[in-house]
Structure formats: C-alpha cells, structure tokens
Amino acid sequence: MSQYYLAVDIGVSSGRHMLAHIQDGKIKLEEIYRFENGMKRVCLRTRISSSCEAMNLLLSIT
C-alpha cells in the first residue's frame, strides 16, 4: 500500500491542494483542488449602524 501526502499551497490570489506519492522511485504530484484566495471587504455590524452601505461609506471616507 502506498503512502500519500497532502500539501496545501496558499498563494496571494489562489491556492491549491496537491496529493503526492512515490511511484517507481519518483515523486508523483497531482493537483486535486484549486481555490481563490484574496482579501474581501466584509460588512461589520455594530451598535452604531447595522447597514452595510453605511459601514462601507465610513470605510471609504477614512
């Protein structure tokens, strides 16, 4: 039975899961999943304002 290894590569704009095993004395790599990675603006709910539009306006002013 072969041993498999999972590696996670997290880049600036995307990431991927790689599966590796040894076959015939060589390392074999297979990309099994790719995903987007990056910053996203989220709406923070506060006591002052529960509106995403108001929070985004405040963030754009400062």
Image (cartoon, helix red, strand yellow):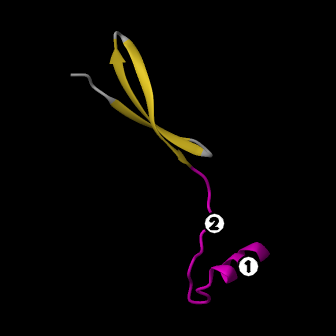
**Badge 1: how crowded within 10 Å, few (<14), some, or many (20+)?**
few
Residue 4 visible: yes
| Quadrant in the picture for the C terminus | bottom right
Q: Which x, y percent locates residue 8?
A: 45, 39
Helix, strand or loop at label 2? It is: loop
Residue 6's mark? none
Residue 61 percent location from the top left of the image:
78, 76
Q: Is residue 56 above or below residue 7?
A: below
- Amino acid residing under circle 1: Leu
In terms of sequence position, does the residue under pointer 1 or pointer 2 come before the other? 2
Does residue 9 show up? no
Where the N terminus falls, by quadrant? Answer: top left
Q: Main secondary structure of the magenta part?
A: loop
Q: Is residue 47 above or below residue 4?
A: below
Pick out the residue farthest to the right: 61
Which SS class for mark 1?
helix
Q: Nearer the viewer, residue 8 or 62?
A: 8
Q: State whether residue 55 is above or below residue 18.
A: below
* Amino acid type assigned to the residue bearing label 2 in the image: Arg
Disc assigned to residue 57: 1
Question: Which residues are drawn in magenta?
Answer: 37-62
Is 12 left, or right, of 19 in this rendering? right
Measure the alpha-carbon separation of dots 1 and 2.
12 Å
Q: Which residue is mark 2?
A: 41
What is the x, y in percent for residue 19?
39, 31
- Give the residue drawn at x 59%, y 69%: 42
Q: Is residue 42 magenta?
A: yes
**Residue at (38, 26) in percent of width and height:** 20
The picture quadrant where one finds residue 11 is: top right
